[in-house]
Amino acid sequence: MYSEEFQERISDLKADKTSGSEEIVRKAIQLIKNEIQKDPIRYGKIMDLSEMLREVIVIKKEMLALRNVLIYFIDFFQHGIAVEDLADRVIQKMDDQRNHLIENLIPIISKCKNIVTMSRSSTIFSALRKLSEDQDRENLPELTIFESRPALEGKKLALEVVNLGYKVNYLVDAAAGRAIQALNPDLVLIGADTIFPNGNVVNKIGCHALAIFAFQCKIPFYIASTTLKLLLKAIPFTIKSYPSNDVWAKDRPKEVKVYNPYFEIIPANLIAGFITEHGFSTNIPDIKLVLEKEYIREMYE
């Protein structure tokens, strides 16, 4: 049995529709940390720790990268890190990855005059913020941002980057094709919720169509993500429909069925490159996580 606070925070994370995957992961890690602090003796046992981590993983089944966080926890635990310090070590690992990714991303986006993005990647926003601190406003790239329905994360991003000095084109998601043709951007750049071993990427609904338009117009389509999001082996992924009220809340005839997926898969053949903490690659980023214990591998099953 878990604490009342743990169960309440789990419910909050399940209901979170606007935070990016890394933000969700960080909130989940803080939740794990708080629960461990309440009973470090209990969670000093591998079985109890693993069970609690599994409880967190299932809150966002579509964010398969949460499984890699579990592996980080178990890996550090196996290497003798005190259970009370596990969350801080995982956060430090994530911070190091993110900082290196931003360092690799800045030289790429600083050369662009117009960048297109969809949804709100916290990593891309951090890179844009860093660029705005280092570069004069008149030299900042123009940003084209789609609203990203149904939660409108794109609107949130547009408001944030305008305050940093960027000029923004803001469009509805359905205008993606027209935007690519009319604006002829230097780059389409998005984050990732999950990167599969074959290079396919899970991200916000609408990104697949955006990738198709970019491919047809010969515009580079890049993924900016740490290798936290890269799965070590393929895991089944089901595109689910979320509450219909997000799309049509009132006066909907019962004969109308709403299909409301938040995520979709972008095929690897549409992706021109990955930018990770290791640099730029046209192929799947190389990640080296050594799974020393069989039960860790079983958690991927």
Image (spheres, helix red, strand yellow):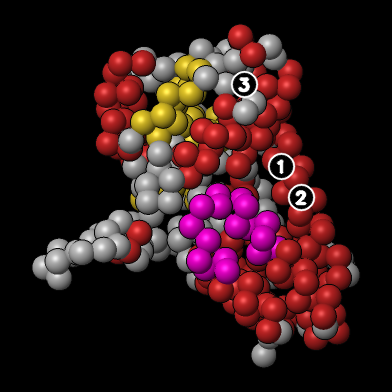
Front-lying residue, 225 or 149: 149
For disc 2, the marked residue is 93
Q: Which mark is residue 69?
A: none
Viewer-side label of 2, 3: 3
In the foreground, 214 or 290:
214
How far separated are the C-alphas under marks 2 and 3? 31 Å
The kind of residue tagged 3 is: Gly
> Which residue has dot 1 on it?
97
Would you say the residues marked 3 and 1 are in contact, meaning their CB atoms lie under 8 Å apart?
Answer: no
> Which span of residues is magenta-colored?
12-29
In the displayed structure, would residue 165 be above or below residue 248?
Answer: above
Majority secondary structure of magenta residues: helix
Q: Residue furthest bottom?
A: 1
Q: Which of the two discs, 2 and 3, labels the residue nearer the N terminus?
A: 2
Instruction: Report if the CB atoms under discs 2 and 1 are less than 8 Å apart.
Output: yes
Q: How far is the residue under mark 2 from the one under mark 1? A: 6 Å
Residue receiving disc 3: 165
First reached walking from the N terminus: tag 3 or tag 1: 1
Amino acid at the residue labelled 1: Gln
**CA distance separating discs 3 and 1:** 27 Å
One can see residue 200 in this view: no
Q: Residues within 10 Å of mark 1 (few under 14, many from 20)?
A: some
